[in-house]
Image (cartoon, rainbow, N blue to C red):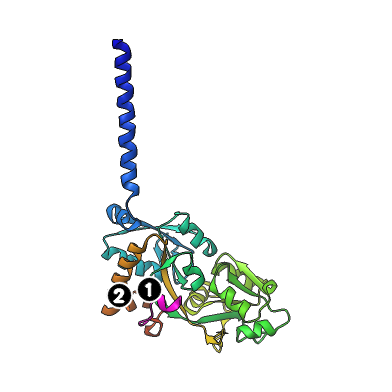
Amino acid sequence: MKKKTRNKIIIAGILMSLVFAVSGCGGSSDQTTLERAQSEGSVTIGFANEKPYAYETTDGVLTGEAVEVARAVLKNLGIEELNGELTEFGSLIPGLNAKRFDMITAGMFITPERAQEVSFANPEYSVGEAIAVKKGNPLGITSYEDIANHETAKVAVPGGAIEYDYLVKSGVPEDRIVTVPDMPSALSALQSGRADVITATGPSLQATLDTANDTEIERVMEFTQPVIDGESVVGYGATAFRKEDQDFVDAFNAELAKLQESGELLEIIEPFGFTEAELPGDVTVEDLIK
């Protein structure tokens, strides 16, 4: 009897230990993403290696407009360390919702469709579109409509980018839109002849061309901004969070507003090709997802 009683006591002790261990894990999971990031002092960000928004330098340093804005905001929230998770642009939102990372810092445009899947912070910048072609612009392309009206012109664009939708709405057949993983791949498609045009936001396209330094490729400076649903297209980029992380969004917005009011936001984004004209002004995420 004594031996059985002793065994029962040992088993009961083990069970109690397991209960306490599980309880401890449960307490940790009760933290919001913001609370966990602040307690750990670090956060994981999803990025798509697209200049000038978010990319790694040749020596492995994570930087870019969206990264540096996030870095400044997060530092003010007590989060010093940013760990990057390289992801194709079209997989960023699924990756965020699958909890592969805590936020998206990729210069992603705010759209009503995307806002159904994620919660955006307020915009960090506003910017229009741009295109590049072979030297001399042999097909005479100066707009998305020109691409649509040409019988064979093909345009390369990163999968999941808003430009894909703009092209389709401008009348470009989907079989003449070449989807690629990122802007370096788009440039490669143009250089190899698999595409006649590449498109992206102005800063992104310019950063790609500056890095390539290819004299046989040129930006079309007389490009006409696309008109979609009766309005000229100007995109607003922002950091994205999971829907359940509204406390993180609110805290991020509060610090972002301080950066804009102090002038520090412009100082952060200027080195990446942005000017005062690209500041978002008083536009909020609510204005863009009505």
Q: Residue at x 67, y 82 (%)?
A: 148
Seen in the picture, residue 278 relative to 69 is either above or below; the reply is below
- Identify the amino acid type marked 2: Ala
Q: Please tell me how crowded label 2 is: few (under 14), some (14-19), or many (20+) other residues with Cα within 10 Å.
A: some
Residue stretch in magenta: 280-290
Q: Nearer the viewer, residue 233 or 191?
A: 233
SS for tag 1? loop
Residue at image mark 1: 122
The quarter holding residue 158 reads bottom right
Would you say residue 137 sits in the magenta stretch?
A: no
Q: Which residue is mark 2?
A: 257
Q: Secondary structure at mark 2?
A: helix
Residue at 42% x, 62% y is 243
How far from the left and from the top, in percent, is residue 247?
33, 63
In the visual, does 73 lie left or right of 66? left
> Percent x, y for residue 287?
42, 79
Tell me the quadrant of the picture where the N terminus can be found: top left
Disc 1 to disc 2, how far (Cα)?
A: 9 Å
Instruction: Indicate whether residue 281 is drawn in magenta.
Output: yes
On the image, the x and y values in percent for residue 214 come to 56, 75
Dot 1 crowding, Cα within 10 Å, few <14, some 14–19, many 20+: many
Which residue is painted at 58% across and 75% down in the image?
A: 165
